Image (cartoon, rainbow, N blue to C red):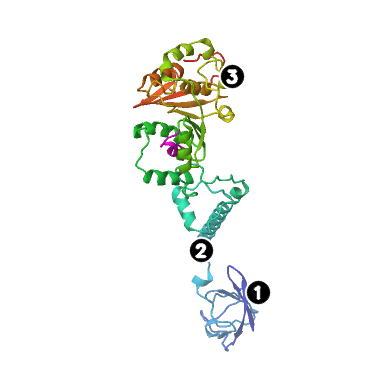
Amino acid sequence: MIIISSHTRTRTRTYNIILSPIPFSRKTKGNNFLSPVSSFHQYRLGWPQFIIKYPPQEPFPLSLLSLSLSKEKPETSRTMRPNKNQSPINIKIITLSLFFLLFLVLVAWSSFSSPRSNPSPKAENDDLTNPSSSLSTDEEDQPKPSTPACPTLPLTPTCTKTPPSLANALVHYVTTNITPQQTLKEISVTLKVLEKKSPCNFLVFGLGHDSLMWTSLNHGGRTVFLEEDKAWIEQITEKLPSLESYHVTYDTRVHQAAGLMETGMGDECKVVSDPRFSKCQLALKGFPSDIYDMEWDLIMVDAPTGYHDEAPGRMTAIYTAGLMARNRENGETDVFVHDVDRVVEDKFSKAFLCEGYLTEQEGRLRHFIIPSHRTRSGRPFCP
């Protein structure tokens, strides 16, 4: 038995080869015999390389050797030898796999930790149809402001119930053939201001068929009506008990307008103060205390009656509205005067609400914006 060592590029294997020598003559010459060349003889028997070691005393003919290998024929060179291109491909696959895993980790981390931005209208609709959608952890930790019940008009998706004041107004104006005294264009002037300021404090001189409309347009705010006719208040409030109205008394007459204009030009009428403490004859002092304590955002002068000489006229109402606007702590007051086509309303609004504060006129309605005079000392009564 001869030990044969197989040398491959990866490891060394050992095979047992049985050599069956056939007798031969020493005198025979040629390439059929093995000649000893050193302490051992080495022969190549194909792939893998076999090294045959045996004592050189007796040479053996290589062609007459019969080899019995205890192992099967070695694999071909394609399977035994490593492919030179295999290593770069494996590196590429590993690199791509690492990048893919890193991408998955980043996506998972961003979806878990990043706060959700403000949803678009389409996203809001999707959230409504998808019950499983939820807020991020950061948004849940933040305090959520309480939402008032139906705060303003127009209605929002979170408040779809019709406000009582609006419902009453719809029923009232659908079932009556009496329309407000102001035209659509005149009402639109005040409506634009209410759209910006409501809910707010709205004081109206006069109680009429348009009172429910003003209350509805100022939904959520306070709308107060001052009326000269007590019987008329009872008649209106019986049908519309939700209206807040007060009875007031005027001791002037339209035929006194010229004299009252001269009085209003005096120095005592140019002093800005609470109407209750004013020394001007035009200042009204008979209102409930709450009317004077409130800072009004809008004031509408559409009363008292002023279309005949014995009517109270609106001289004192116009002056008092301008004085209350100037006497507020800060900010501005929008003052509206209706029926400016008449002499009293025309002259007194220009004199005491000031043409410098006039911003708009539509039909018989004038709109003045009067700033607070208490925030800046020395401000003239009219600009």
The residue positioned 44% from the left and 18% from the top of the image is 354
Q: Which residue is mark 1?
A: 39
**Which three-letter amino acid code belongs to the residue tagged 3?**
Phe
- Residue 86 circle label: 2
**Which three-letter amino acid code belongs to the residue tagged 1?**
Ser
Q: Is residue 38 visible?
A: yes
How many neighbours does mark 3 have within 10 angstroms: few (below 14), some (14-19), or many (20 or more)?
Answer: few
Helix, strand or loop at mark 2: helix
- Between the C-alphas of marks 1 and 2, the distance is 42 Å
Label 1 or label 3, whichever comes before in sequence order? 1
Residue 372: image location, x then y, percent: 53, 22
Residue in front for this viewpoint, 141 or 203: 203
- Front tag of 3 and 2: 3
**Which three-letter amino acid code belongs to the residue tagged 2?**
Gln
**Magenta residues, start to end:** 207-214
Q: Which residue is mark 3?
A: 277
The residue positioned 52% from the left and 10% from the top of the image is 267
Callout count: 3
